[in-house]
Image (tube, rainbow, N blue to C red):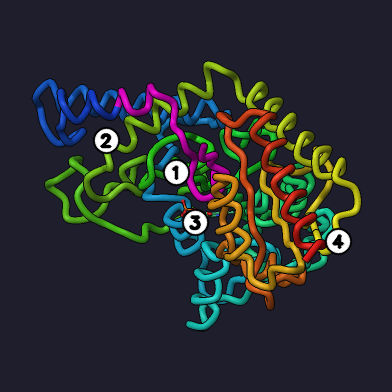
């Protein structure tokens, strides 16, 4: 038996309806939306707009046309950051953010365009103190850009409190929901989020090659395009259309992927994201309780919060005997059929915070809606057995 615990990289399996929707498009439609007057193109366009509507409903957005399709979450974050900042701006992020925020910021800083501050995160809770974010604000600060749930510690930021600070100081608020959208309720209006970036291929259960950026109505005025090209609209003009969503969607869409994504989001809406979160909470509680039942495991560390509250279904572990996480992940696969991800997970700052950077990171278990509490118990018991063997060596 092989059990997939790498949902933080991309979710697997996908609901059968995702494959069915993609197969139908591949065999019956195959056309580019908005590019033809014939029925198949019109139908493809209708399916794409339905995907936008479903995403807008899921996040409680204010406008379907402000859901922009991107290649992945990285692409969405690049558009949000590069589109928003101006020379001399200052941006605030956290120490545990992903390279898809840190690398564009570093590049912009290296090019002399912006400066940025990385606010520390408490290793035990995985959270940044919102007051530290407030203290980092300077007269030049234009944006707060941070992740919701950490893909290393599982800790979740206090989005509401940070959103209030962003509003008080009139800052753009960009949230990277790569590890939480589809797993957790998300209300962009209630949280005061200006820009919400997410992959389509993780919690939203769509295929790889899909992602989105939600742009709060009005915020598009402050966002430049980072890519221009064909949109199938206003083709007589040689400049990018200024209306949404075409302004930010140059080039042919990943239509087959987005139709799969639409089916993934429909699956989530039908079940209700609250009930998906409830299931994830049960998996998190099982992981923590099952590991606790093993008692004191010499050399074992569960990094990040040991609580259900304020955490998502991402667990990082180390066992001292394995001074590199890869052999531990290999053992979990070969002897227990557990598919995990060793390494630094594109978030070196998070590992610096945990003290795991020098040892090459951790082994990460990440949950999805198709895992059961028995699967999680099995994984925790595998960890317990490995620790027992390690202490007997
Ligand atoms: C927190 C976080 N942000 C951004 C990303 C980038 O997502 P994508 O691979 O869709 O570009 C990831 C992916 O692992 C992530 O965990």
Q: Nearer the viewer, residue 194 or 293?
A: 293
- Taken as a whole, is the magenta stretch helix, strand or loop? loop
Query: Reading the chain from its start, which is encountered first: label 4 or label 3?
Result: 3
Work out whether residue 78 can be spotted: yes
Query: Reading the chain from its start, which is encountered first: label 2 or label 3?
Result: 3
Task: Give yes or no for residue 194 being in the magenta stretch.
Answer: no
Is residue 208 placed above or below 94 in the rendered structure? Answer: above
* Marking on residue 298: 4
Q: Name the spot of residue 369 as percent of width and height, x first.
A: 58, 30
Region of the chain picked out in magenta, as a range: 1-21
Nearer the viewer's eye, disc 4 or disc 3?
Answer: 4
Ligand 1 has an atom within 8 Å of the beta carbon of the residue at disc 2: no
Seen at 36% across and 24% down, the residue is 50
Query: Reading the chain from its start, which is encountered first: label 2 or label 4?
Result: 2
Residue lying at the far front of the rendered structure? 393
Ligand 1 has an atom within 8 Å of the beta carbon of the residue at disc 4: no
The answer to whether residue 296 is left or right of residue 359 is: right
């Amino acid at each position: 038996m092989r059990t997939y615990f790498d949902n933080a990289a991309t979710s697997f399996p996908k609901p059968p309806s995702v494959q069915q929707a993609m197969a139908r498009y591949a065999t019956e439609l195959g056309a580019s939306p908005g590019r033809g007057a014939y029925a198949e193109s019109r139908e493809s366009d209708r399916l794409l707009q339905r995907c936008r509507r479903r995403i807008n409903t899921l996040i409680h957005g204010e406008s379907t046309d402000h859901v922009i399709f991107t290649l992945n979450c990285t692409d969405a974050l690049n558009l949000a950051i590069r589109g928003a900042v101006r020379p001399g701006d200052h941006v605030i992020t956290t120490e545990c953010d992903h390279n898809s925020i840190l690398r564009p910021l570093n590049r912009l800083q290296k090019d002399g365009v912006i400066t940025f501050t990385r606010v520390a995160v408490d290793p035990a809770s995985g959270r940044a103190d919102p007051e530290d974010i407030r203290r980092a604000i300077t007269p030049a600060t234009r944006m707060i850009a941070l992740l919701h749930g950490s893909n290393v510690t599982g800790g979740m930021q206090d989005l509401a409190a940070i959103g209030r600070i962003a509003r008080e100081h009139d800052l753009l608020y960009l949230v990277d929901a790569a590890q939480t959208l589809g797993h957790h309720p998300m209300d962009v209006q209630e949280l005061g989020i200006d820009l919400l970036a997410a992959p389509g291929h993780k919690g939203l259960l769509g295929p790889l090659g899909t992602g989105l950026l939600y742009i709060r109505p009005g915020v598009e005025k402050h966002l430049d395009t980072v890519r221009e090209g064909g949109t199938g609209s206003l083709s007589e003009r040689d400049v990018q259309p200024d209306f949404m969503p075409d302004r930010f969607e140059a080039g042919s869409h990943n239509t087959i992927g987005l139709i799969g994504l639409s089916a993934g989001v429909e699956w989530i809406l039908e079940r209700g994201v609250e009930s998906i979160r409830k299931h994830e909470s049960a998996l998190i509680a099982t992981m923590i309780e099952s590991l606790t039942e093993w008692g004191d495991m010499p050399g074992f560390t569960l990094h990040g919060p040991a609580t259900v509250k304020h955490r998502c279904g991402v667990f990082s572990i180390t066992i001292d005997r394995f001074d590199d996480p890869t052999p531990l992940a290999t053992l979990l696969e070969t002897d227990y059929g557990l598919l995990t991800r060793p390494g630094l997970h594109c978030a070196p700052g998070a590992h610096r915070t945990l003290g795991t950077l020098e040892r090459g990171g951790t082994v990460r278990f990440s949950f999805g809606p198709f895992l059961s509490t028995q699967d999680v118990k099995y994984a925790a018991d595998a960890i317990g057995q490995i620790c027992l063997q390690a202490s007997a060596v």
